[in-house]
Image: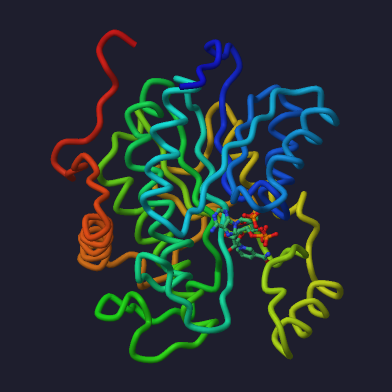
Amino acid sequence: MYHEEPSTNPVALVTGASSGIGLAAARELAVRGVTVVCASRAEGAGAEVAERLAHETGGEVRFMPVDLSRPHDAAALAQAFEARFGRLDVLVNNAGAFVNRHVRTEDGFELTFALNHLGPFALTLPLLPLLGRSRGRVITVSSNAALGARLQLDDPHSERRYNGWGAYAWSKLCNQLFTLALARRVDADVVRAYAMHPGFVATAFGHVDGFMGTAVRGAQRLFGRTPERGADTIVWLATEPHPLAEHGAYVVDRRVRAPAPKARDEAAQERLWAISEAALEQVGVRLAEVPVAAPVRRPASV
Ligand SMILES: NC(=O)c1ccc[n+]([C@@H]2O[C@H](COP(=O)([O-])OP(=O)(O)OC[C@H]3O[C@@H](n4cnc5c(N)ncnc54)[C@H](OP(=O)(O)O)[C@@H]3O)[C@@H](O)[C@H]2O)c1
């Protein structure tokens, strides 16, 4: 397997860095001397974008392909990443999408839930020991859309009825439920977990067919922030030596905000965790257990 010389720079893995907020975050991190590994689909623009970023910033920027809507692929990326880099300081779970009709992945999962939640879940858990070795941070890009979400624990794949916005809001609520459940499992002085909202950002997000896509493009032109502004809080959480945000915090514009009320329900957090583990097991992805009672601890030698 391809192995890189151990980096003396901090290393960040940014998913969905081929466009939008992820690209802006990757660029700024590379400018600041972070080795950035961009991960998105092989058939997308990721490889070309990473090469361009390396050229533009003079920094170390790499690309690793992954389809995050396939938990198996996400877990395989974690393994390949560890073998190749052996160091991880920041994981940015940014890749995500709005899907306007019910699409089933090859695994039989609803695409929005699979990409926006199960992918980050399957990627993050196997990377915790590596993150723990460098007091790492996990930053998951959620959204204020979670405020209007239904808690779909009895129908995570939106089988009963599908509404693109509803499925998206639910997946972003999952990002917050996941971050809070993760924060309970992992010591704050080993790995810190954050969820964040980037604001309403003018990116390729929501550029679907029909009226919805046209409306989103129009609204983005009128009200959208730049991707750089959207990425600012990610870069801040990733690089501040002593982030002000506490473990598990939901952060908007560098300020800690209350997460969606439904995200604060511990029983719901644990049910989502169990549902996610079961979904992964169903497709043959077995992750080491990360129980609440036995948090991942920093090895004594580090
Ligand atoms: N834009 C907003 O106003 C807004 C607001 C709140 C939250 N967010 C969140 O911000 C995050 C980034 O969105 P964005 O606005 O920057 O959108 P974007 O420009 O559409 O970027 C989405 C990124 O996700 C990647 N991606 C899509 N499907 C993937 C898959 N199956 N596997 C791996 N990567 C995949 C895309 O890369 P490829 O297509 O090259 O694979 C792309 O790099 C999302 O989680 C979104 O929910 C956005």
Quadrant of the image occupied by residue 141: bottom right
Quadrant of the image occupied by residue 220: bottom right
Rendered location of residue 176, percent (x, y)? 41, 60
Q: Residue at x 56, y 61 (%)?
A: 96
Rendered location of residue 248, percent (x, y)? 39, 48
**Residue sitting farthest toward the top:** 301
- 157 horizontally vs 53: left or right: left
The correct choice, above or below, for 126 with respect to 43 in the image is above
Ligand 1 shows up in the quarter that is bottom right
Rendered location of residue 52, percent (x, y)? 81, 36
Rendered location of residue 262, percent (x, y)? 35, 72
Q: How is the image coloured?
A: rainbow
Q: Residue at x 63, y 31 (%)?
A: 36
**Residue sitting farthest toward the left:** 293
For the C terminus, the quadrant is: top left
Quadrant of the image occupied by residue 200: bottom right
- 180 horizontally vs 19: left or right: left
Q: How many marks?
A: 0
Q: Residue at x 50, y 87 (%)?
A: 163
In front of the other: 59 or 247: 59
The correct choice, above or below, for 302 with respect to 174 in the image is above
Q: Residue at x 42, y 56 (%)?
A: 70
- 173 horizontally vs 92: left or right: left
- 86 horizontally vs 44: left or right: left
